[in-house]
Image (spheres, grey):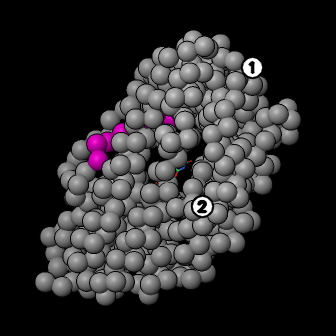
Amino acid sequence: MEKKAEHVVIVGAGLGGLTAALALLRQGFRVTVLEQAPALGEVGAGVQLSANATRVLSLIGLDEVVAASGAQPTDKEIRLWSTGQTWQLFDLGAASVQRYGHTYAMFHRADLHKALENALRSLAPGAIRLNCRCESVDLSGPRPSVLLSNGERVAGDLIVGADGVHSRVRRAIVGADQPVFSGMHAWRGVIPTNRLPGHLRKPAGVNWVGPGRHVIHYPLRRCELTNFVGIVEGSNWEVESWTQQGSLDACLGDFKGWHEDVQTMIRAVDVHFKWALMVREPIERWSSGCVTLLGDAAHPTLPFLAQGAAMALEDGYVLARALAAHSGDVPAALSAYESARVERTAKVVRGSNGNAARFHNPKLANAQGAAQYIEDQWAPDKV
Ligand code: FAD
């Protein structure tokens, strides 16, 4: 039976939830976003958005945000952990825009989050409700509802779980499965770029590869800041939190023996955040009745293709488009949404998992073998 969606309730005001809310509002739906946090804000870290994601920002009317707050890199480089030898991988500047039609942009997460929040508040001032923690979702009534921790129930014609890797909404759909620790932790930190020597200030995305670990760094906020991420395999650190801090010494210890440029960056980081990386096997069913998922709630993705947030943005836009195309008929729209998203996102999850072995390959231990390995792995036809 056709069930119309007029009021969509989104659980989670992360990058995915806010994008979905904006896309839905622009298609004429009424939206409420329930966020557990007492105030909105993103952590001090970067997020790279490839052209598929900046295209979504353009489609929801945020072109100027990309131009104003993103840093636009020119290149992507691979560097070898021990010698620092550099390979030019591909163009992320003009040639990339010409090929994909949209910019590759690198954001401070807080800037992007704020821009989405401002756009949403200007379209629908009361849409975001803070201090609203979802405990469970009830699918049994004529309309699904969210039970909040204060006892209130919020019903909608459609409920969307955009509540991240530990999603409560997901439980209502697939049961209480838990994300699994990947055996890797990430160091994250932001560096004022003027602390770095000139050759580390290039507007490029750089990926250092080495046995059992890798490092990514790229510019943020018109190159005023540099984002640093270091991934370490063989970890027993299972705390998954954006705010958990480690120490400078522990971070240096994880990259002992790595090239001086990496040591320089680690020393220049303001605060060394440490985060366990969690994985889940992709699922094939994201919806039950009038409840569905998007972003990390549906498909948490290791950050090794820089596509987790990009997929969350795409999900939000495609969901709104499906609802509009099916005149708000929820079952038909959710079926179209899943058909468009499940296979694509599973491919990204598996591709990201596969990149761990590629970036951390034992062949990288020896400089001579490593050069050959890099040339084989990152030949233009394999990128
Ligand atoms: P989240 O950002 O986790 O947002 C979930 C929201 O829901 C939060 O606001 C949370 O407070 C709220 N919430 C949670 N539970 C509840 C509840 N019970 N009730 C109410 N609200 C709730 N992706 C890229 O595309 N490019 C990158 O460069 C990139 N770099 C990354 C680097 C690292 C080190 C890591 C770990 C990830 C990276 N990612 C990247 C992935 C990206 O960060 C995530 O995929 C993305 O943030 C997911 O967005 P989301 O909106 O689905 O979930």
Question: In the rendered structure, which amino acid carries the disc numbered 2?
Answer: Arg
Residue at (53% x, 23% y) in the render: 373
Using the rendered image of the protein, determine whether residue 149 is visible from the camera's viewpoint: no
For the N terminus, give its image quadrant: bottom left
Q: Position of residue 34 (x, y in %)?
A: 43, 67
Q: In this orientation, which residue lies closer to the viewer: 194 or 354? A: 354
Residue 379: quadrant of the picture: top right
Q: Which mark is residue 260?
A: 1
Q: Position of residue 217 (x, y in %)?
A: 66, 38
Residue at (60% x, 61% y) in the render: 99
Pointer 1 or 2: first along the chain: 2
Give the Cα distance between marks 1 and 2. 35 Å
Note whether 78 is above or below 306 in the view shown. Answer: above
Segment tinted magenta in the rendering? 274-282
Please tell me whether residue 281 belongs to the stretch shown in magenta. yes
Element class at badge 1: helix
- Residue at image mark 2: 99
Q: In this orientation, which residue lies closer to the viewer: 319 or 111? A: 319
Using the rendered image of the protein, determine whether residue 320 is visible from the camera's viewpoint: yes
Q: Position of residue 183 (x, y in %)?
A: 40, 26
Element class at badge 2: helix
Question: In the rendered structure, which amino acid carries the disc numbered 1?
Answer: Glu
Please tell me whether residue 376 belongs to the stretch shown in magenta. no
Note whether 247 is above or below 353 in the view shown. Answer: above
